[in-house]
């Protein structure tokens, strides 16, 4: 069985603020290109239309980010995932001077008073760090009034919710931004479409990111509409690439794909973990950020890029000072 790529990530390579605060446009971030064979290339995200071909299809995630963090005096509650029975998965975090850190306390049956006289009841543990919980009112409406975007310590101050939305965001539901879509601008989308490159949406509502390097992802709600399934299958039949804008898109498409790679309309919950052992069936390219050492995402990237090309890419990214995390630089992987 393949193991996820391991490396030392220098703290200086964490993006502390949106690129706009660094004097860049959204689409002006750097783009590391893994072209299948050969050495990594260094480009800008604005170069994307010239790196793809007419007939290629980019599949994007249209999930919009919720202000999913509710802050108390000493704790924060991160609302992760809405469940079918109206309860939510939540993570408890201990507030620090910079952001928050995992909090392992709490007991089943405990009630937590939240701002606005709301009450959250812990029902039981779903994973070692996620609780099943019930709020005494509608969660999305409550978050709009009392929530803030989830922020980790490498981001040094709060940014408005707009900084955590992509141009594709139309369906609220993600605890954290589907960040591979952030560098797309309206102008870049226009240039892609004018070049004969298609764009089609799926929806996958992301839960809270795992602070544990070796923790696999958990079930997330997704939808692959009929129109997108049709476009994916047409691109494949016509010899075009199917490029997923984000690991969330890979997860959704690979869940909806049959053994022959044909994608069908699909909706529900996915627990799919893409690894090199299983490979990918529908996706032939990926636009993504730069991921933490040993994360499950790197298993997925290895399945698309191959182990050695991915290792070369990450060595180049560290050597050339690319920036990590949701406000950082990007990586285009094209399978050989």
Image (cartoon, helix red, strand yellow):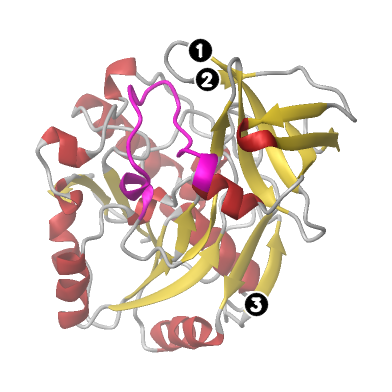
Q: Disc 2 on helix, strand or loop?
A: strand
Q: Which residue is mark 3?
A: 266
**99 relative to 240, above or below:** above
Q: Which residue is mark 1?
A: 96
User: Residue at left 13%, top 59%?
Assistant: 47
Q: Residues within 10 Å of mark 2 (few under 14, many from 20)?
A: some
Choose the circle earlier in sequence order: 3 or 1: 1
Image coords of residue 212 (percent x, y):
61, 26
Nearest the viewer among 9 and 281 is: 9
Closer to the camera: disc 2 or disc 3?
A: 2
Q: CA distance from mark 2 to mark 1?
A: 5 Å
The quarter in which the N terminus is drawn is top right
Q: Which residues are magenta?
A: 145-165
Image coords of residue 133 (percent x, y):
78, 40
Q: Disc 1 on helix, strand or loop?
A: loop
Nearest the viewer among 155 and 240 is: 155
Q: Which residue is mark 2?
A: 100
- The circle on residue 229 is none
Image coords of residue 309 (percent x, y):
36, 44
Q: Quadrant of residue 126?
A: top right
Residue 280 visible in the snapshot: no
User: Residue at left 57%, top 81%?
Assistant: 262
The quarter in which the C terminus is drawn is bottom left
Residue 179 visible in the snapshot: yes
C-beta proximity under 8 Å, tags 2 and 1: yes
C-beta proximity under 8 Å, tags 2 and 3: no
Query: Magenta span has 205?
Result: no
Choose the circle earlier in sequence order: 2 or 3: 2
Q: CA distance from mark 3 to mark 1?
A: 41 Å
Query: Magenta span has 158?
Result: yes
The chief SS type of the magenta part is loop
């Amino acid at each position: 069985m393949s193991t996820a790529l391991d490396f030392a990530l220098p703290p200086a390579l964490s993006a502390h603020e949106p690129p706009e605060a660094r004097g860049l446009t959204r689409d002006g971030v750097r783009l590391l290109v893994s072209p299948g064979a050969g050495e990594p290339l260094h480009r800008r995200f604005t170069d994307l239309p010239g790196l793809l071909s007419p007939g290629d299809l980019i599949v994007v995630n249209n999930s919009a980010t919720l202000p999913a963090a509710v802050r108390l005096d000493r704790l924060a509650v991160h609302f992760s995932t809405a469940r079918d029975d109206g309860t939510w998965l939540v993570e408890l975090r201990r507030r620090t001077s910079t952001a928050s850190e995992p909090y392992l306390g709490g007991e089943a049956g405990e009630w937590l008073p939240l701002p606005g006289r709301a009450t959250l009841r812990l029902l039981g543990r779903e994973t070692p760090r996620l609780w099943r919980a019930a709020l005494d009112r509608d969660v999305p409406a409550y978050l709009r009034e009392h929530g803030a975007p989830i922020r980790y310590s490498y981001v040094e101050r709060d940014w408005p919710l707009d900084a955590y939305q992509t141009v594709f965001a139309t369906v609220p539901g993600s605890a954290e931004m589907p960040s591979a879509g952030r560098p797309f601008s309206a102008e870049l989308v226009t240039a892609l479409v004018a070049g004969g490159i298609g764009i089609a949406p799926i929806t996958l509502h992301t839960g809270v990111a795992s602070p544990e390097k070796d923790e696999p992802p958990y079930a997330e709600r997704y939808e692959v509409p009929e129109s997108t399934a049709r476009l994916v299958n047409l691109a494949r039949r016509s010899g075009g690439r199917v490029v997923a804008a984000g690991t969330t898109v890979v997860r959704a498409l690979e869940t909806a794909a049959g053994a022959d790679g044909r994608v069908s309309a699909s909706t529900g919950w996915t627990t799919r973990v893409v690894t090199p052992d299983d490979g990918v069936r529908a996706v032939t390219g990926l636009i993504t950020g730069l991921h933490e050492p040993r994360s499950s995402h790197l298993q997925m990237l290895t399945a698309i890029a191959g182990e050695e090309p991915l290792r070369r890419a990450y060595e180049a990214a560290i050597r050339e000072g690319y920036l990590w995390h949701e406000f950082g630089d990007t990586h285009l992987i094209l399978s050989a």
